[in-house]
Image (cartoon, rainbow, N blue to C red):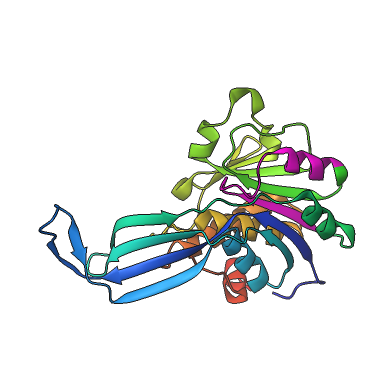
Amino acid sequence: MQLARPYKVLLIGDSCTDEWVYGPCNRLSPEAPVPILIQSEKEQAPGMAANVHANLESLGINVTFLTNKEPLTKTRYIDSRSNQQIVRVDNEPDVRPLHPSELQMALLHETYDAIVISDYDKGYISDTKIISDIAGRYPNTKIFVDTKKTILPTEYSNVIYKINKKEFESLDPDHIPNSANMIVTMGSDGAAWNKKKFPCTDLVRTFDVTGAGDTFLASLVFYYIQLPSMDEAICFANKAAAIAVQNPGTYTLIMDNVDRILNI
């Protein structure tokens, strides 16, 4: 698939490094009833908003990326024989929030086809006022928001929220967006939007769900800015996420994946 023209996206969000430490677990520790893992391999990949960034750039989108400088990490220890995760260790230093001047500079000289907010609630996006400010200032630009916050601005028709089922169930009942402005992902059951369900049409063997939501978000934006049909974009994103979960770790889409989805 060839892009019709250069597309520009502003991406704002919390980033981390995803790590996987592999090795066999053959015995329990004599100090406590926990397995001993003998490290044999370690892998790293961009995580959270950085995963969205990697996917968009891999698909040819020009991305301006605003994210934290602090080194957040998520380290998973995995028994290489059973492929079972033993424990996950997160390193979460205090994150300096996005400064308004950084956002103003990013918006000053560029026109974007979409603005994407990937908010894992780690501190870079301190509150939802950023969503309101951008949506009010750019009413003709689609703003895609993936957030873990529970009180959401609901008055902007140009904002599309992408949250999972668990996050939806945690929303403040007085601040639930209109169904036309909210996509709820449901894992292997697909997604729902605007009172319609979009089931997964590809039955796949799930290997690792890490980053599948990021893949869904990036592919949703990738499709929509070219062909602005939300129904089609959600179906495309479902198929992209199905590809991602068949791979270990966070998976970065490539154009061959796009061609496969579109049967090109």
Q: Residue at x 59, y 27 (%)?
A: 172
Q: Residue at x 60, y 54 (%)?
A: 14
Percent from the top left, x then y, of residue 56? Answer: 66, 66
Asked if 141 appears above or below 62 in the picture, the reply is above
Asked if 97 appears above or below 176 in the picture, the reply is below
124 in the magenta segment: yes
Q: Residue at x 33, y 76 (%)?
A: 41
Percent from the top left, x then y, of residue 53? Answer: 64, 64
Percent from the top left, x then y, of residue 79? Answer: 25, 65
Residue 106 in sight in this render? yes
Asked if 143 appears above or below 243 in the picture, the reply is above
Q: Quadrant of residue 197?
A: top right
Residue located farthest toward the left when viewing the structure as drawn: 30
Write the start and end of the magenta stretch as one range: 112-136
| Horizontal relation, residue 95 to residue 242: left or right | right
Q: Quadrant of the N terminus?
A: bottom right
Q: Quadrant of the C terminus?
A: bottom right
Closer to us: 225 or 159: 159
